[in-house]
Every structure is written in C-alpha cells, then in structure tokens.
Amino acid sequence: MDKEEPMIEPVLTRNRQRQWVITLEELWPQGDGEGYNSSSGLDKRVEWCEEEIKKWPGVRRMAWDQWWFDDKGQAEKFITLYYLVWAR
C-alpha cells in the first residue's frame, strides 16, 4: 500500500529580528510522516518558491524552505499566490 503524500503549507510567523517568515511545512496524515525524509512534492514547491521569490523585493531566502519578508502584506500576498498555484 502506497503512503499518502503530505499536504505542504506555507506557515507565516514573526522572528526576533521582526521579520515575517514563511516556512514550507509538510503535514503528513497522522502517523505517516514519522521516519520519512521530505517528499518530492516539497522539493518541487521549494524550487517554485525559489524562482518566484526572485521577482519580489524585500525578501531573502534564509534556509532551504524558509524566506524572510520585510512586509507582512507582501508575505500574505505570496501565500495567496502559493495557494492559487498549488491548489489541490
């Protein structure tokens, strides 16, 4: 039986440097994510974000799956675009 793919969501938080942070997080069905590496779906979405973010001013990539935004409104717009592109 094949394992289900996780849902991948952009999560918006604020860090100590007062930057708005988007992190892509995998949400595995209960019990399925334990002991697994990231899914191929996460790789594809990180690659898409990497290319798309180049067009956005005031954004820096800070980790493989994390970007810092200077402006909360811009981060929220990016999340909206993400959901439009990656709707299930």
Image: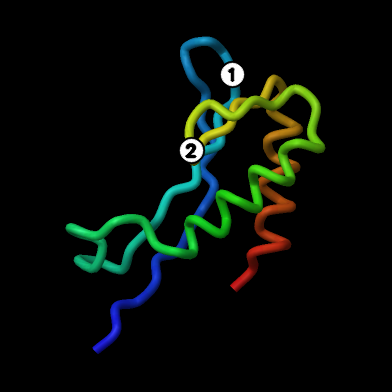
Q: Position of residue 58 (x, y in %)?
A: 75, 22
Q: Residue furthest bottom?
A: 1
Label 1–label 2 contact, CB within 8 A = no
Give 63 or 5, whichever is nearer the viewer: 63
Going from N to C along the chain, the mark reached first, 1 or 2, is: 1
Callout 1 amino acid: Gln
Which residue is located at x 79 percent, y 34 percent? 56
Binning the other alpha carbons within 10 Å of mark 1 as few (below 14), some (14 to 19) or many (20 upward) gives: some
Image quadrant occupied by the C terminus: bottom right
- Residue 18 lies left or right of residue 83; in this view the side is left
Coloring basis for residues:
rainbow
Q: Position of residue 66 (x, y in %)?
A: 52, 35
In this rendering, the answer to whether 8 lies above or below 15 is: below
Give 81 or 52, whichever is nearer the viewer: 52
* SS category of the residue bearing label 1: loop
**Label disc, if present, on residue 37 of the rendered structure:** none
Residue identified by numbered label 2: 64
In this rendering, the answer to whether 40 lies above or below 26 is: below
Image quadrant occupied by the N terminus: bottom left
Q: Position of residue 48 (x, y in %)?
A: 65, 53
Q: Position of residue 38 (x, y in %)?
A: 36, 56
- Please tell me whether mark 1 or mark 2 is closer to you in this view: 2
**Label disc, if present, on residue 19 of the rendered structure:** 1
Which residue is located at x 81 percent, y 37 percent? 55
* SS category of the residue bearing label 2: loop
- Residue 71 lies left or right of residue 57; in this view the side is left
Q: Quadrant of residue 22?
A: top right
Callout 2 amino acid: Trp
Q: Quadrant of residue 75?
A: top right
